[in-house]
Amino acid sequence: MADISLSHFEEFIEFLFSKLPGLPADVKSIFISYGPYIVGVAALLTLVNVGLAFIEGAAPGSLGLYNYYLSQLSSLIFGLALLSSFRPLQQNKIAGWRSLFFLNSLYLLLSITIFGIDNLILIVLAYYLLFQVKSYYS
């Protein structure tokens, strides 16, 4: 049986994206400078969205009750994880980068198994950006 871990997956994805053209250094520095704040705002908006959905008693709609609550739970987990990665990203620590990589990988898995594959373009773009700026984190 093959030994598959997140680090093997990271190496594989990094290999794939290393073949693509790189971003200019000034564009990378913009992502490094403003990335933590974008992540922080995204975390807060996600948590507010989950809170409002529970307060308002939003109807599950076409997702079905099980998928609705599963999507709300995953949104809550994603929001909290994004919020916890703010400080390491601000300090250019690899832990913050790995947190975003893990969340993107989890989002890929959830998108395929629950929500559909319509988010794959955003996931691929996120992987591309993550590996473009990885060298800035230690």
Image (cartoon, rainbow, N blue to C red):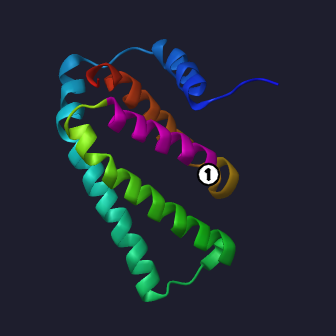
Q: Residues within 10 Å of mark 1 (few under 14, many from 20)?
A: some
Q: Secondary structure at mark 1?
A: helix
Task: Residue lying at the far right in this picture: please name it.
Answer: 1
Query: What is the quadrant of the N terminus in the image?
Result: top right
Q: Is 95 in the magenta? A: yes
Can residue 21 be seen in the rendering of this structure?
yes
Examine the image and state in which quarter residue 61 appears: bottom right
Q: Is 10 in the magenta? A: no
Q: Which residues are magenta?
A: 94-110
Where residue 73 sits: x, y (%)?
Answer: 53, 67
Examine the image and state in which quarter residue 53 appears: bottom left
Left or right, 97 with reference to 107? left
Where residue 103 sits: x, y (%)?
Answer: 47, 45
Q: How many marks on residues?
A: 1
Comparing 71 with 6, the one in front is: 6
106 lies above or below 55: above
Left or right, 113 with reference to 11? right
41 lies above or below 86: below
Residue beneath disc 1:
110
Where residue 78 sits: x, y (%)?
Answer: 45, 56
Instruction: Identify the residue at horizontal 53%, vertical 61% (top origin).
Output: 74
Amino acid type, residue under disc 1 in the picture: Leu
Instruction: Identify the residue at horizontal 20%, vertical 39% (top origin).
Output: 90
Query: What is the quadrant of the C terminus in the image?
Result: top left
Predominant SS along the magenta part: helix
Can residue 64 be seen in the rendering of this structure?
no
Left or right, 55 with reference to 28? right
Where residue 14 sits: x, y (%)?
Answer: 50, 20
Instruction: Identify the residue at horizontal 33%, vertical 51% (top origin).
Output: 84
